[in-house]
């Protein structure tokens, strides 16, 4: 494991990150409590939260949000502005009107398997698995599992023959 990213860049918040070798992290990123694998590239304006895991040889493009509970395996491409969600019933307060805390909701893990590609602007709801070598089209909203090698597009994301 490396002590930090392989490159220098201004305006990065890096806290308690486990870096693989040769990881490049662009400016204006927030990475905390996560793990990033060897040779992965993190674009500008990306946030990766505590508990997220990103494998080796991945590309995470700008303006992407990767929350707690997300596991991204090796060789995955994540396009610009992709949003991961880890709670299917988000609420600000409990039934009694107090602000929710970590005990008031259930984390729904999301798993992106090896070699998958997520198109720009896609949204992946919590609790889904994107199979190995699958392709999620730009702007798709993934509400259920995507089988290995499948291409899905639309809202909600549905199977589509690859062109």
Image (cartoon, rainbow, N blue to C red):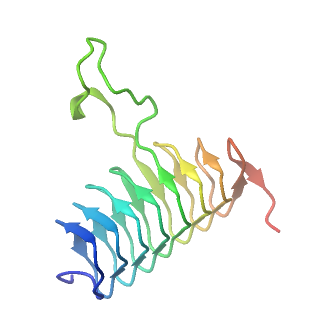
**Residue in view at x 46 percent, y 75 percent:** 58
**Where in the figure is residue 159, as x and y percent of width and height?**
74, 51
**Where in the figure is residue 37, as x and y percent of width and height?**
34, 76
**Residue in view at x 59 percent, y 41 percent:** 143
**Where in the figure is residue 91, as x and y percent of width and height?**
38, 26
Q: Quadrant of residue 120?
A: bottom right
- Determine whether 132 is above or below 56 in the image: above
Q: Nearer the viewer, residue 42 or 86?
A: 42
- Relative to 81, 30 lies left or right: left
How many numbered tags mark residues here? Answer: 0
- Relative to 127, 18 lies left or right: left
Q: Quadrant of residue 94?
A: top left
Q: Nearer the viewer, residue 12 or 144?
A: 12
Q: Nearer the viewer, residue 74 or 121?
A: 121
Task: Locate the C terminus by quadrant.
Answer: bottom right
**Where in the figure is residue 27, as x and y percent of width and height?**
35, 75
């Amino acid at each position: 494991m490396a002590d930090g990213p392989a490159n220098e860049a201004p305006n990065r918040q890096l806290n308690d990150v486990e870096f693989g070798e040769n990881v490049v992290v662009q400016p204006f990123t927030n990475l905390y409590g996560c793990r990033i694998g060897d040779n992965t590239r993190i674009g500008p304006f990306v946030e990766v939260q505590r508990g997220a895991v990103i494998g080796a040889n991945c590309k995470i493009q700008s303006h992407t949000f990767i929350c707690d509970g997300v596991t991204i395996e090796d060789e995955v491409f994540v396009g610009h502005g992709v949003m991961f969600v880890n709670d299917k019933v988000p609420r600000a307060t409990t039934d009694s009107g107090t602000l929710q805390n970590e005990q008031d909701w259930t984390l729904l893990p999301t798993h992106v398997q090896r070699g998958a590609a997520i198109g720009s602007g896609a949204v992946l709801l919590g609790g889904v698995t994107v199979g190995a070598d699958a392709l999620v089209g730009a702007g798709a909203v993934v509400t259920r599992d995507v089988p290995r090698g499948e291409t899905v597009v639309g809202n909600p994301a549905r199977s589509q023959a690859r062109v």
